[in-house]
Each structure stands twice: as structure tokens, then as C-alpha cells.
Image (cartoon, helix red, strand yellow):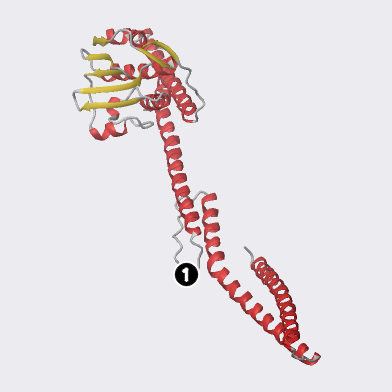
Amino acid sequence: MKKSDLKHKVLRSLYNYFLFFLLVAFLVTCSTMLFVSILSETLHIELTGDNLNAAAKLTFLNVIFLSILFTVIDAFRRKYTTERITKRIAEAAKKVIKGDFSVRISPVSQFGADKNFNEIIDCFNMMAEELAGVETLRTDFVANVSHEMKTPLAVMQNYGTLLQQSDLEEEKRIEYAKGVTDGSRRLADMMTNILKLNRLEKQQIYPITEEYDLGEQLCECLLGYESVWEKKQIEIETEIAEDVKVNTDSELLSLVWSNLFSNAFKFTPKGGKVTVILEATEHHAIVKVKDTGCGMTPEVGAHIFDKFYQGDTSHATQGNGLGLALVKRVVDILYGEISVESALGKGSTFTVKFRRT
């Protein structure tokens, strides 16, 4: 705020207060004179005009003096309590507007300050902290997307350069073309998952519930990976309880099974084993997907459902760290629960729990 504007504001405030107290002085003087007049008539005391004028002037001047005194005192009180605090809040808000989310306001402890300001300050600090968290997530998200896109783009660029060779053997041409296709498919899958996750987080996808057999859905999704497990010679074991009905969104839930099965086959080595179990209790349906893959440490398991988190990157050449984040969000939207148990070098077990119909 400019000095001229501040000076104008102060003078206007003093002017308003002075007018207010001047009105009070006039009313007090009139009331005092009326009281004295009534008192003199009641007590039969004779008051001359000069006495009344002198008393009126003295009363008026006293009230004016007190009015000016209290106006100045109140102006200083406002300046060192209310105005100083509001100025601090305004300055902090301007910093937040400019993108500085690290700003915090210390609580008010000075004498005479309105304690309600502390509630406003606490709310402001919480808001700034939340915005800082959101900004960190946004920055990390952009950085992670950029990083994840670089790898397939670099692979596609390299294979594209090799394909330009005129004397390239047919076998190599097919291999390089497949590399380009795989890279483009990975990019497409990543963008699809980003869009789905974004829509889920913004609540733009609403579950359409229907009753269906969960065991049949699991078997259908599992059969979709038949070529994968046959190629890697992975042993499949299923323990599917019969007639387990659930009332939920089948399309959203199929995303969960597809991602869990994809992860299981991806991280299970050749000749390993993947087990799918469906159990039913009186109120819940429980699905477990077990693999004999590389497993993970407790530290990795604690973050496995975070976006773009891949843990041991040596085993993540085909992933983008979005699948399990998508799974977690879908399970949350469908009011289910998901957990993971894992041991490094022994494999992992993902457990999903839903209420039955």
C-alpha cells in the first residue's frame, strides 16, 4: 500500500471517529442540560442564563476532549492490534498467490488482540500446508511422467534409426519394428492409465452396480493372460469358491484383476507359479493373487500403491508405476480394501476384500 493511500485511510478513520464522538458530545451536552434544568425546577434552585451557558460550554468541551482522547487511543489500539495482524495475513496471502506455499503466520499473543484471529491464522497455515502438498504432488507427477515417457521414446527413436538402414536383414527389421510397436503400446498404456486415474481422482467416474458372479469374472480375466503364462511356462493354481455374488461395478473391478494379474505374470520368473484364490465369508468376498516373483521389502510395500512408485527399478522395465495406484483408487471407490504381503526373493500376495450382496 502506498504512503499516500495509508495516510488517507488513517485520516478518514480519524475523521469518522471524530464525527461520531462529536455527535455523542452534542447528545451528552443536551442531556446534561435537560437534566440540570429538571433538577433545578424540582429542587427550586434558581439558575441564571450565564450559569447555564458556562455549564453547557464546560460540559461540551469536556466531552470533546474525551472524544478526541478516546479517538486517538482507539486509533493506536487498532493500529497495533487489528491492523497489524490483518496486514500480516494480507502479506502472507500475497506470497501464497505468487506460489510461495512455505509461508506460515505465527499465532497472535499480544495484549488486546482479538483471539479469533488465531483461528483465522490456523486455517491459513493449514491451507498453505495443503497447497504445498498439492504443489509437490503436481511437480512430482510432471517429473515422473516426463521420466516415464523418455524411456519408450528413446527406444522407439533408436529402433526407428536402425530401421532406416537399407541393408537391414528381414529378421532384424521385424525385431526393430516390434520394438517400436512395444514402445508405442507402453506409451499408450501409460496415457490411458493417467487419464483413468485422473478421472477417478476427480470423481468423474461413477460406479454402476450390478449383481454378478465374481468367480466367473476372475476366470475370464485370468484366461486373457493364457498366452503370457504359457510363454513363460508359469504354473497356474486356482481355488475359486462357487456362487460368490457381489453387487458392484464389474467394469471397474475388471481393471483391478487385470492389473494384479499383469503384475503377477510380469514379476514371476520363467517356471514360477501364480495362485488365484477366491474365498467367501458371510459378509465379504476375498480375492488373493499370489506369485513367486522377486517380492519386495517392507519399505517398498509401504509405497507400492503410490503413483509412479516402482520400488526396485531393475524389475520395472515394462511398467510405469501407475497400475497399482489405479487399483487402489478403484478399490477405494468401490468401498473395498486392498493390502499386500511380500518377502524379498519369495514373492507377493495381494488381498482384495469386498462386501457381498
For image coordinates 77% across by 88% down, the residue present is 52
In the rendered view, does 21 fall on the left or right side of 48? Answer: left
In the rendered view, does 110 fall on the left or right side of 298? Answer: right
Q: Closest to the observer: 24 or 179?
A: 24
For image coordinates 30% across by 17% down, the residue present is 282
Residue 162 seen in render: no
Quarter of the image for the C terminus: give it.
top left
The image position of residue 39, as x and y in percent, is: 72, 84
Q: Closest to the observer: 346 or 178?
A: 346
Q: Closest to the observer: 228 or 292?
A: 292
Residue 125 seen in render: yes
The image position of residue 168, as x and y in percent, is: 39, 12
For image coordinates 30% across by 7% down, the residue present is 242
Outermost residue, right side: 49
The amino acid beneath tag 1 is: Phe
The image position of residue 37, as x and y in percent, is: 75, 83
Give the quadrant of residue 283.
top left
Which residue is label 1 attached to? 111
Asked if residue 23 is positioned above or below residue 100 in the image, the reply reads below
Q: How many marks?
A: 1
Quarter of the image for the N terminus: give it.
bottom right
Asked if residue 89 is positioned above or below residue 277 in the image, the reply reads below
The image position of residue 335, as x and y in percent, is: 39, 25
Asked if residue 14 is positioned above or below residue 209 in the image, the reply reads below
